Image: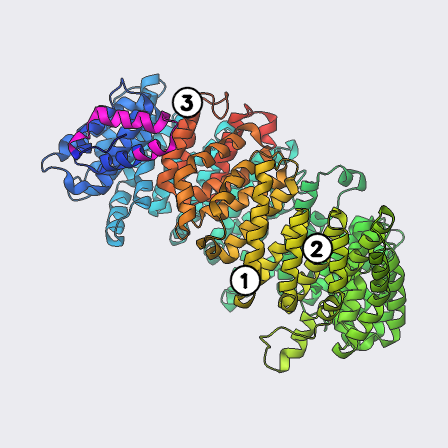
Amino acid sequence: MEAVHADEFTVEAVERALQQLYYDPDMEQKNVAQKWLTQAQASPQAWHFCWALLRPDKVPEIQFFGASTLHAKISRHWSELPPGQLDSLRSQLIAQVGQFASGSKMVLTRLCVALASLVLHVLPETWPTAVPDLLCAFQTGESVTEAGGQSRWLALLELLSVLPEELQSSRIPASRRSQLRSALAVDWSSVCSLLQQLLQRPDAPSPVRERVLRCVSSWLTLDIALKDSEGLLESCFALLKESEMFNTAVETIVSIISQPDCQRFADSLLKVVPQVLALQEQLKKAVQDGDMETSHGICRIAVALGETHCRTLLEQVDHWQGFQALVSMIMSCTGTPGHYPVDETSSSLTLTFWYTLQDDVTSLDAERQTLYLQIYRPVYFQLVDVLLQKACFPRDEDYAGWSADDKEQFRTYRVDISDTLMYVYELLGPELLRNLYDKLGSLLTDSTQPSSWQDIEALLFGFQSIAETVDVSYSDVIPGLIALIPLITANNLQLAETIMFTIGSLAEWLADHSLMLANVLPVVLHGLSNPDLSVACVSALKRICRECRHDLLLHTSDIMAVSQAVLVKDIHKALGFLLSALPREEILGKLLSLVTPHIQRLEKLASEPPSSANKLPVVHILGLLSNLFSTFDLNKQSQRLEVMRPVQTQPHNDNPVVVVLQQAFPLIQTIVSKWLNEPDVVEAVCAVFEKSLKTLLHDFAPLVTQLCELIGQMFGAYPQASALDLTRQLVHIFGCEKDLFSPILALLELITNITMSIFHHGSRDHPDVVESFMQLHAQVLRRKADLYLSDRLDIKAVFYCGILSFKFPETPTLKATCLLFTELISHCEEIPAVREVLQEDGKLLLQTLLEAIGGQSPRSLTEHFAEVLFSVSRNCPSMLSVWLREALLPPGFPSSHLTTEHKDHFCQQILREQVSKQRMKDIVKEFALLSRGLQGTECAANY
């Protein structure tokens, strides 16, 4: 499109520009059209041509631009409105909203936003009755059940919903915003009355009632008082009986009762308590029927009330029985039958409530605190029993059938329970440990009482949770616990691991009671022979060596003997822990005596011609060194030594691992040169340095320059993910070190250029390299984004590599690509190259994302795609509006399952969401299900 003069901003010219923007394949022409349209929107003529673009004979894309132009003029160019034109503008806008009530939802929303913006300009001085007038304008007497009437009601509800939202998102001075908030809050009574009537009408269709609830949530941002919403809240509780309205009703109820301002209205809160308690029968039935969705929703409501208003309800001493009943209800949610997350998902919601209740009870005045402690100490002892029951592992055969994701969620859940138990100990004190000890002793010594390994493990888990962070040195039950541990038959991996972690948690106590080491050290050393227990055993041994190193002289030979024995079996990390616990002056000698035989063996292998026969021992010895160095942690020893003297800012130049690596570096270079094209050997070499780097941190500095050269040599000969991962560690630790900046930048430039050539010649066979390349540049963006301000690193090329990476089927590669784009987009303001590539090809990124969301990629990745979209929404909102409309314009894209209404609704939601990442994830999840034709299916319910 050629440049035009201002007097050529006509309807026809705008339509031609829109045609060019949407359909011209030439990106340069699209950019010209977009720039011209922006100028057109800002011109005074826009007040006139916007109405012509809204005519019924125009396609929705043109109508949308007309509505957007109208909003832009009202929100940004209000001063241009000619005197005396306000009434005409208002009437036309109201009429257009009415006409589009049955038209494109996307256009309707933009018109509603435009009308909302007008209201905010003239409220309350010029148009004090704006909200009542609008209520009257859209209530024509048509039944809500008739098609036309329903459309007008939905249009009115959309307008009411966007009004507070426009106030939140508009750039308005704080004083004016406060004035408008107060003015709108005055109209809440009439709005609330209308909404309540619609909710109570038995013939009101679900879409209308859904929109009513959304409207409620929107108005809550105006800090509406709970006392002014009591009737509406009651209507929301009634909707919980209707399955199709249940989820939205839960969200609205939680929003209403979670308002902190509700605490000023204790009387209103007290009215809510019986309404929540009345849900117990529905909750009980849902649990019995296995209806996880219903039990989860009711639990959310109970916890929201109890957690948000715990202090206020406690202060109503005359009503203590009602609050106690609510606490009992929440306890029943905590103890929901079944195992989390397979059988239930409610119990995890309640854990923070118990923190809140404990804090609020213990912060009351002495008289009320005494009263409530009498009531709630027994409750907290009950809570411990419930939590330990919930922490129990399921039966072996059931657990074997759990997915990896379920097992990970259960592990995280147990961590949360552990934290809760630790906190509860502050309330219950030593009596809690005595209680656990008595139960454990009974299980282990009473042959008449049947017990499972799960019961024993749970009690040990309780001990470990408390001992991990609480000083138990004064407890009189720890000696008894130490004596009980050897009596436990650890015939199960989980039980054996918990025994080891429990011993580790008692390491500080053992340091003060060294005679008891003889009880538990054999248990740990025996466990080292089991490969499945290596992590737990090494953890316990490390802690014992660290805390009790001055008391281990009698046990040193046993530890060394077992460690040397398991060294042969590749379970040798304990050696690193043991050596790092020795006095610093003895470490190098001990370390050299351990590694010298292996270095000599490696020298012999390096002198031989490469073969499959000697490759395995080379990889084995390199792996041994990797694991030894990975546990060789002198930092904590240094921290203990530095307590009484100033902290050193320089790295230790005499670190024994650095000394060994410097001596072995020529040998490693020889191995690399001989085995340069052998991936296993290169990966093993990278592992030696990566694990050493993670442990040594800044002590590794003397080796950085040599290592950068070695990585470049390896990656140039045979590009491998391990070299990229090692580079990422260098960037993470030394990215901000000026002295080491040059070799790291040179390495980044080299491997980036090499990887570009892989993409050019076909990267499909190297998903691991692509994944690590994405992670590397995401790390650079996080740690040293200003590297991309130079010409040496081409961020635009990285961008296009990322686009190609979205086509990969491998989940880890796609996750890494999402991470890269999330980071990259967040730097669009400070890095010009990022801004330029987004302006040029942001639409391409959006199209690629939508293809992936719409069915090309696994559904499990939708949350990661949503994070990229959220980053675009936060950092490039204006460009996103154009890209999204253009990308979704072609029929059948990104899926034939999607209708125009689906796409319109998705656009509205995406463009509106710039605050909640979780909300964005929900929007993208729903769109992914629609795209795959899965919404409403059992598959969707499990998604």
Range drawn in magenta: 7-32
State the CA–CA distance, disc 1 to disc 2. Answer: 21 Å
State the CA–CA distance, disc 2 to disc 3. Answer: 52 Å
Closer mark to the observer between disc 2 and disc 3: 2
Q: How many marks?
A: 3
Closer mark to the observer between disc 1 and disc 2: 1
385 or 531, nearer to the observer: 531
Mark 1: secondary structure: helix
160 or 593, nearer to the observer: 593
2 and 3 marks in contact (CB < 8 Å): no
Give the left or right position of residue 514, taking residue 143 as reference.
right
Q: Which residue is mark 2?
A: 686
Residue 689, image quadrant: bottom right
Q: Residue 742: which numbered mark, if any? A: 1
Indicate the position of residue 475 as horizontal and vertical percent values.
73, 70
Closer mark to the observer between disc 3 and disc 1: 1
Indicate the position of residue 654 as horizontal and vertical percent values.
70, 75
Residue 329, image quadrant: top right
Q: Which residue is mark 3?
A: 900
State the CA–CA distance, disc 3 to disc 1. Answer: 53 Å
Residue positioned 58% across, 55% down in the render: 747
Mark 3: secondary structure: helix
Q: Amino acid at mark 1?
A: Ser
Residue 914 in sight here? no
Q: Amino acid at mark 3?
A: Thr
3 and 1 marks in contact (CB < 8 Å): no
> Dividing the image into 4 quarters, which one contains the C terminus?
top right
